[in-house]
Amino acid sequence: NKRVITASASGKSEGSFWGGFLVGGTVFGVLGFLFAPQVSRALLNSERMKKLLGDGHENLEITREMLNDKISELNSAIDGVSAQLQSSSSKGNANNPEQM
């Protein structure tokens, strides 16, 4: 005679988990909704944040220059790969005139 013992989670503990999850989510969601505008206003108006963000125009111009440099690098890389592909395909066609 062998007895099989199985352990199962009770429905009560599972239900209390989801209940706590919903109550906690609701409470902190409401608190976040109420206090987020005040916190963001306080942060944006602080002198430290103004120093970090700067004028905005300076950062925008620097970012634009960096993006233009990256775009030109990508274009030159694409041109190089394209030239390699064209030269390899023209060599392949010269070696095998049936493909032409």
Image (spheres, rainbow, N blue to C red):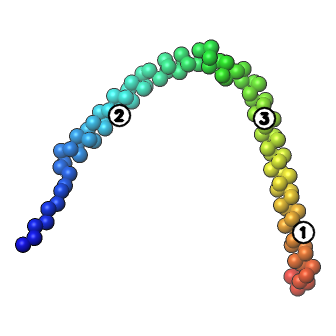
| Residue at numbered disc 3 | 64
Taking the spot 10% from the left edge, 70% from the top edge, the residue there is: 2
Image quadrant in which the N terminus is located? bottom left
The Cα–Cα distance between marks 1 and 3, rounded to whole angstroms, is 35 Å
Q: For residue 87, which numbered disc appears in the image?
A: 1
Whichever of callouts 1 and 3 sits on the residue coming sooner in the sequence is 3
What element does badge 1 sit on? helix
Q: For residue 25, which numbered disc appears in the image?
A: 2
Residue nearer the viewer, 94 or 8: 8
Counting from the top left corner in percent of width and height, residue 80 is at 86, 58
Whichever of callouts 1 and 2 sits on the residue coming sooner in the sequence is 2
Residue nearer the viewer, 8 or 30: 8
What element does badge 3 sit on? helix
Classed neighbour count for the residue bearing mark 3: other residues with Cα under 10 Å, few (<14), some (14–19), many (≥20) = few
Label 1 amino acid? Ser
Counting from the top left corner in percent of width and height, residue 43 is at 56, 19
Label 3 amino acid? Arg
